[in-house]
Image: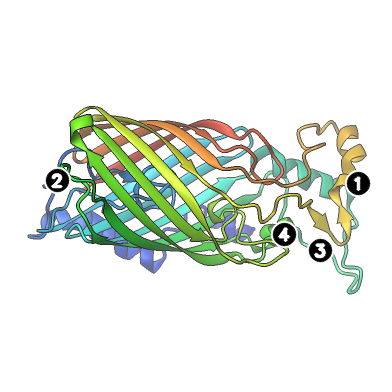
Amino acid sequence: MEEAKRNKFPLSKGAALFVAMLASSISHGDLFDSGKVLATGGVSMIDGAGGGGITPWATITGYATKEGINGDLHYTYAPLANYTLHSVGAAVGFWDRFELSYTSSSLTTGSTFDTLGLVFDTVGGLTDSVAGLPISTGIEPFNTTIDMEVIGAKVRVFGEAIYDSDNFIPQVAVGAFYKTNKNDELLTTLGADKTKDWEAYISATKIFFPINTLINITARYTAANQTGLVGFGGPDGSDKEIRPEISLAYLLRKDTVIGVEWAKHGDNLNGQSVEIAGLDLTSLQPTLETLGLSNVAGTLTQNESDWYDAFVAFFPNKNLSITMAYAMLGNITLTPDQHGFYLSLQASF
């Protein structure tokens, strides 16, 4: 936990440094290129890939054509009812063919896990029944943060999303993420099978300029819980499955896009209660109510919902995009009704 406090945004890793240096320096080299049409570079999703807010697209990040390189730095802030997500990273697109990305996400768990930390401190006496030693739950009052690093890569396989608007052949890309979650103790307590894993996806994207509309369909092969922020898999293992994702976007004018997204999520931890040393937290509900902690009482069973959002993205120029959205994320671990606005900024070079 002390490490999580010191490295809330652990961008000093080699992968982050490499991608950030490329993104910030290519504007000074001969390979710099920004020839694509405004807004067609998309924005950065929370995992760092080019696309929408919650799903990757087949487009390559930035405005580079096949003649050069373009990149971005991105930041997303999403304050929800019981959680707050910060996501910061960088991505580079090479010759409109290949993309590399790195993102560091930090999820502060707010009142939900603050409350559980207070309960553990109040009840006390949680020990391993065999070794007789204190058990570390990873849940501390006012000090529980989930950090995750995501390294991504994407390759355009065929098709042209932008300039072949007179046919129905989409641009198709395949990509992958490798995700490393930093809070091992908390994820074990919640029942996740793994704290790090890979996932792969295939995306098909088409922009129909006569009707100013973009359609994207993604199939993601993953075992992630809440995109990996709550680990991967559950008590039954971490077998991957294919989950569909869809984005629809409409160009209001050349610098403004509105749209909606949907991403299918899994059920690895659905119905699972937090259990420590044989102590199911549902047995602590009288204690919770006595302490006045009604925000957790009655919500001790985990569930995960599909994610939805409705967004508007503004592109004042090719160097900046501002995305505002309303995210409907439903159940996240122990807490239902996690909805709220989010803001995402992207600087392209």
User: Residue beneath label 1, please?
Assistant: 283
Of the two numbered discs 4 and 3 on the same chain, state the one appearing first in sequence.
3
The residues tagged by marks 4 and 1 sit, at their Cα atoms, a distance apart of 18 Å
Query: Is the residue under label 3 in contact with that under label 4 (CB below 8 Å)?
Result: no
**In x, y percent, where is residue 228?**
55, 56
Under mark 1, the amino acid is Ser
**In x, y percent, where is residue 177?**
43, 62
Answer with left or right where residue 123 lies relative to residue 184.
right
Q: Residues within 10 Å of mark 4 (few under 14, many from 20)?
A: many
Label 4: which secondary element:
loop
Image quarter (top left, top right, bottom left or bottom right) of the N terminus = bottom right
User: Residue beneath label 3, please?
Assistant: 135
**In x, y percent, where is residue 47?**
43, 52
Of the two numbered discs 4 and 1 on the same chain, state the one appearing first in sequence.
4
The residues tagged by marks 4 and 3 sit, at their Cα atoms, a distance apart of 15 Å
Answer with left or right where residue 62 lies relative to residue 120.
left
Q: How many marks?
A: 4
Of the two numbered discs 2 and 4 on the same chain, state the one appearing first in sequence.
2
Query: Is the residue under label 1 in contact with that under label 4 (CB below 8 Å)?
Result: no
User: Residue beneath label 4, please?
Assistant: 191
User: Residue beneath label 2, please?
Assistant: 163
Of the two numbered discs 3 and 2 on the same chain, state the one appearing first in sequence.
3
